[in-house]
Amino acid sequence: MLMLIPVSMVLIVSDVTTPGACREVEARIDMRPLTFTEEQKKKIRTVPGVDFRDAKNVFKEIKQETIGGWSYGYGYYFSPKADPEIVYEIVKITYEQRKELAKAGIGFKPWSENPDGMLKSAFAVTPHVSLHAGAAKFYKEIGISK
């Protein structure tokens, strides 16, 4: 059973958080990471759109090699008035070049590794949100439909 633990603050860090930012946080607050069991990690990974992973610890005061954390799927939004062919090309290029995007920004890494799974999860938790016609066309072509 996964239990929710009340905390006074949740700190979000990523693989690109600067050491200076980490030192600033450590100087201001007393922190401790949450420790997750394998069962809890497995349960978290069942949540649609969530990618759980153990990230390298960047804090000096915390004496452990990794810190568990998760990222959520994210999206980009187009006006319904945007040209469907332009939106189609943007979505297609983003999908096809996902590995290059991950090299440019670590935030793209989870999505670049499992785009189909993250898209299906995002669609599952947002049935009330319609896709732009250009995006829908591309996703249908690759076999992922909402």
Image (cartoon, rainbow, N blue to C red):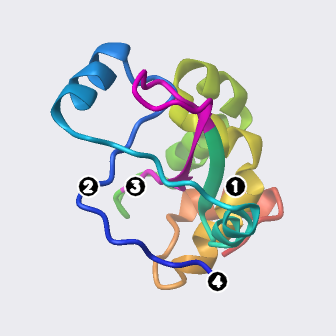
First to last magenta residue range: 55-78
Closer to the chain start, of discs 3 and 1, is 3
Residue 141 x, y percent position in the rendering = 79, 58
Task: Mark 3 vs mark 4: give the one in front.
Answer: 4
- Picture quadrant of residue 98: top right
Quadrant of the image occupied by residue 80? bottom left
State the separation of the CA atoms marked 4 and 2.
Answer: 23 Å
Q: Which residue is mark 1?
A: 138
The x, y position of residue 118, in whole percent, is: 67, 58
In the figure, residue 44 lies in which quadrant? bottom right
What amino acid is labelled 1 in the image?
Phe
Residue that mark 3 sits on: 77
- Which residue in the structure is indicated by mark 4? 1
- Between the C-alphas of marks 3 and 1, the distance is 15 Å
Of callouts 2 and 3, the N-terminal one: 2
- Above or below: residue 72 compared with residue 107: below
- In the displayed structure image, the side of residue 104 where residue 9 appears, left or right: left
Closer to the N terminus: mark 1 or mark 2?
Answer: 2
Disc 1 versus disc 2: nearer the observer: 2
Q: Residues within 10 Å of mark 4 (few under 14, many from 20)?
A: few
Instruction: Give the amino acid type for the residue marked by disc 2 in the picture.
Output: Met
Quote the CA–CA distance across marks 3 and 4.
Answer: 36 Å
Which kind of residue does numbered mark 3 sit on? Tyr
Determine whether the residue tagged by mark 3 lies in a helix, strand or loop.
Answer: loop
Position of residue 4 in the picture relative to residue 108 (left or right): left
The kind of secondary structure element at disc 1 is helix
Other-residue count near label 3 (Cα within 10 Å), few / some / many at <14 / 14–19 / ≥20: few
